[in-house]
Image (cartoon, coloured by chain):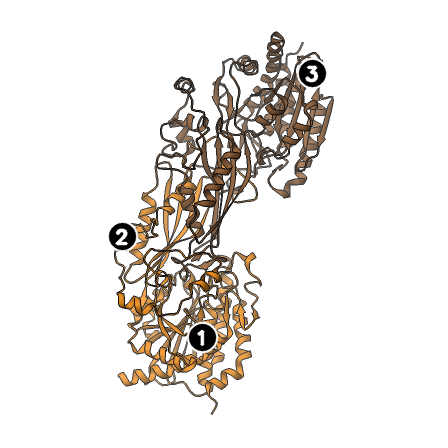
Chain colours: A brown, B orange
């Protein structure tokens, strides 16, 4: 009988062709002009799941972008794996920095380049192909459900309501998510935590119109200067965040756990070289791995004010704007941090300007216990597919829906990520290594197998 | 015999029509796409001077935009007034804040709205019409020369060379400039000084591409955050500028002169109301008038980095940019200050980012002695046309060419400005009061008359 490994090898080229079709759709959830593309993408995914052998596939419309649900119930007595993924992508700008158009996928040196290649189309599609593979090779040991949403990049505003109102539909024994990265195929790793997120937009208003900087400069508060001062005030000289209360709920990690984490291989020289920087930066007293894993951060994602065109314009701007987000760790509350950020910005400016800060979206941090059968099944699966035991790591990113699933379904989330840190997520030239794509498809059936065994042994 | 006052009244409507044609040309010197408009504008001005009665009009091409030269030599034994003006204008963006298109002039409530209405097309055109008026009413007491350039808003990069190489052509006894403002027609004032200018552009480079703020945030220096810190570091808590050496050459003003300046009427409540601000801002220990007149300033004219579009993008930007300019007072050197600014920005950033600061353009400050016949002629002219003696004030703006003329021609510059501070120079809805336009045309012949008398009495 054909093994799933053989089946995947035989159908590699078709799997790739199908992925390319998916990547061609500019499903940017934050831009209103792409709404039709979101619908088109949902329909394409529906067709893919039907073709893969799902016995029910439904597109659920929401107040925002549609959710695609699929399931294959093989044997009600068996455990059920619920796969979560998202088909929406980040905006592609700055377009001029892409070597090839973001929605015209290109394969080069065994990597596929396109917006969404790794985050998350390429990764959720591994599950679609794993479903097909298990069915075609009669090796599906459990039931599978799939929920693929279209609003992850904008904070999943409608998913919580959907999950809450479809608990029965989504009833499962584990939630499996492939929306994270690993260190490398020959150094497999599993994210055991994702950071939470607070995101605000700040608007500083000075005079009621742009002014001549010679006639008014020096006598009227410049909103760009004030905004710069507010941003500068967010970190002290040691790059600790100064927002009052910011660290109040942060769970400090034990010496032992930090020592454990420090075992994960990290080559700072290679890291700096790959990013083109001459030094790393960050909170005093922590390593780069810790700064992106166990510590909360605050970043300016965008800032704009005044004249930004060609040449010189001597203007004192009326308005200045910034997009600012914080990554949160257990047990920080996005709600509390967002309020603290808004309070800081709205109350720290001098008279002469008005500051309005508004919330974009947030997400709770999440942690998977490494002694849980969910984690153990994932670890064994990687060991079997990649021939090496994975190391547990803390991911720096945020997947706001984790807490939602746990709250509504009372099941654990486990991350089986096949992306790499250098996949340029959210950046120009996003890519996904095809070796990781195929290995991911091969690993998922192992996960289903081991999870079913461990689950049945436990119950 | 018809007086020039009568002639101006009779031809008001035609003067306005001609000004409107001039304002329709989008002569933006900083934008390459407007190069053809610059040529078109120069030709239009050439025709206007010919129609006004100039006996020589020439368009001189430069490495940048053309210079229009015109002259009317009535009597070589008489003194010569050289009028300087500029036909180039600032960019019009943000376009959405204009109530009517910037290059489709609209007359409303006795004001004409268009980019360049006051700065400087409306004001140099007063001189064209004054020339016509004096010739038609046989009241021209002196010779007149006109040099109208197209690069004032970009720092007159080619004017210095032109003036140096055309000293004979431009030989004169006084340089008359209408590119400044007065307090009001019923509170006439004359600028006795303009501030110098240093203008730089700062580029901060962090990682070699935009990064995922979750994966890299907190571990890699964010150029937007660093730029904000650099800008915040330019002013201390008292809003003194902290750039080393910035104040070294500033001429401190005597108590007496400050007391004299304080007599100029200033209504802070009206000032704040007109700008929509709840408080003024600026260097501790100085009044608003002093902050914009006798003190140097440093302003952010523009800043941009990262994602500035709709919605949220969790990106750690690769680049951050700012346009920053300083207004200078006697005896600050633009060269020295520009070097100090570049040095500060390029040497104050932490490892992990690279900072490149480049010079945009600069200009020397200038002062007209109030006991000079040039100033006295201007003051008498305003007194005669407006029925009230003008007060001397320090203008906040910069006219980089002043020093150029004095150096090359060894003659004094006098400012006869008819704009108002609320003309929205460099801002949306720039306007020029038609009453000021007509009064300006009426005042110029008085200036020629009194200057000629004072000059001849002196020599």
For marks 2 and 1, give the CA distance.
40 Å
Tag nearer the camera, 3 or 1:
1
Residue A446, above or below B135: above
Using the image as rendered, state which of residue B179 and residue A248 is in the foreground: A248
List the residue tagged with mark 2.
B245
The answer to which quarter of the image holds residue B456 is: bottom left
Residue B79, above or below A229: below
Which residue is at 28% across, 68% downward? Answer: B257
Element class at badge 1? loop
For marks 3 and 1, give the CA distance.
90 Å
Q: Are discs 2 and 3 located on one and the same chain?
A: no
Q: Are discs 2 and 1 located on one and the same chain?
A: yes
Residue A119 spot, x, y in % from top left: 56, 30
Element class at badge 2? loop
Q: Which residue is outermost to the bottom? A: B1
List the residue tagged with mark 1.
B185
């Amino acid at each position: 009988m054909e093994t799933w490994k053989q089946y995947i090898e035989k159908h590699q080229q078709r799997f790739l062709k199908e992925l390319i079709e998916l990547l061609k759709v500019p499903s940017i959830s934050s831009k209103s002009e792409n709404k039709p593309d979101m619908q088109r993408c949902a329909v394409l995914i529906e067709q893919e799941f039907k073709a893969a052998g799902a016995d029910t596939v439904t597109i659920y419309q929401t107040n925002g972008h549609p959710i695609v649900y699929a399931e294959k119930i093989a044997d009600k007595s068996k455990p059920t794996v619920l796969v979560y993924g998202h088909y929406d992508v980040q905006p592609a700008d700055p377009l001029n920095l892409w070597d090839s158009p973001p929605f015209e996928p290109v394969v080069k040196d065994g990597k596929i380049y396109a917006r969404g290649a790794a985050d998350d189309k390429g990764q959720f599609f591994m599950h679609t192909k794993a479903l097909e593979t298990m069915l075609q090779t009669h090796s599906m040991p459990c039931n599978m459900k799939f929920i693929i949403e279209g609003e992850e990049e904008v904070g999943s505003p409608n998913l919580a309501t959907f999950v809450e109102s479809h608990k029965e539909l989504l009833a499962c024994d584990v939630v499996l998510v492939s929306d994270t990265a690993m260190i490398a195929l020959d150094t497999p790793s599993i994210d055991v935590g994702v950071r939470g997120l607070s995101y605000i937009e700040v608007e500083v208003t000075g005079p009621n119109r742009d002014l001549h900087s010679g006639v008014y400069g020096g006598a009227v508060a410049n909103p760009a200067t004030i905004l710069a001062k507010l941003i500068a005030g967010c970190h002290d000289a040691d790059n600790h965040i100064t927002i009052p209360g910011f660290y109040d709920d942060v769970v400090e990690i034990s010496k032992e756990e930090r020592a454990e984490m420090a075992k994960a291989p990290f080559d700072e020289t290679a890291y700096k070289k790959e990013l083109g920087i001459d030094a790393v930066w960050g909170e005093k007293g922590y390593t780069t791995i810790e700064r992106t894993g166990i510590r909360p951060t605050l970043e300016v994602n965008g800032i704009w004010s005044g004249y930004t065109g060609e040449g010189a314009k001597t203007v004192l701007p009326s308005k200045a704007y910034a997009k600012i987000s914080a990554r949160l760790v257990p047990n920080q509350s996005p709600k509390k941090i967002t309020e603290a950020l808004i309070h800081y910005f709205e109350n720290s400016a001098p008279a002469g300007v008005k500051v309005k800060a508004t919330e974009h979206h947030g997400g709770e941090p999440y942690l998977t216990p490494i002694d849980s059968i969910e984690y153990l099944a994932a670890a064994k699966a990687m060991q079997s597919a990649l021939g090496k035991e994975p190391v547990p790591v803390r991911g720096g990113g945020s997947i706001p829906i984790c807490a939602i699933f746990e709250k509504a379904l009372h099941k654990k989330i486990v991350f089986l990520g096949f992306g790499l840190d250098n996949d340029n997520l959210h950046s120009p030239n996003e890519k996904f290594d095809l070796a990781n794509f195929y290995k991911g498809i091969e690993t998922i059936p192992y996960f289903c197998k081991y999870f079913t065994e461990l689950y049945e042994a436990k119950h």
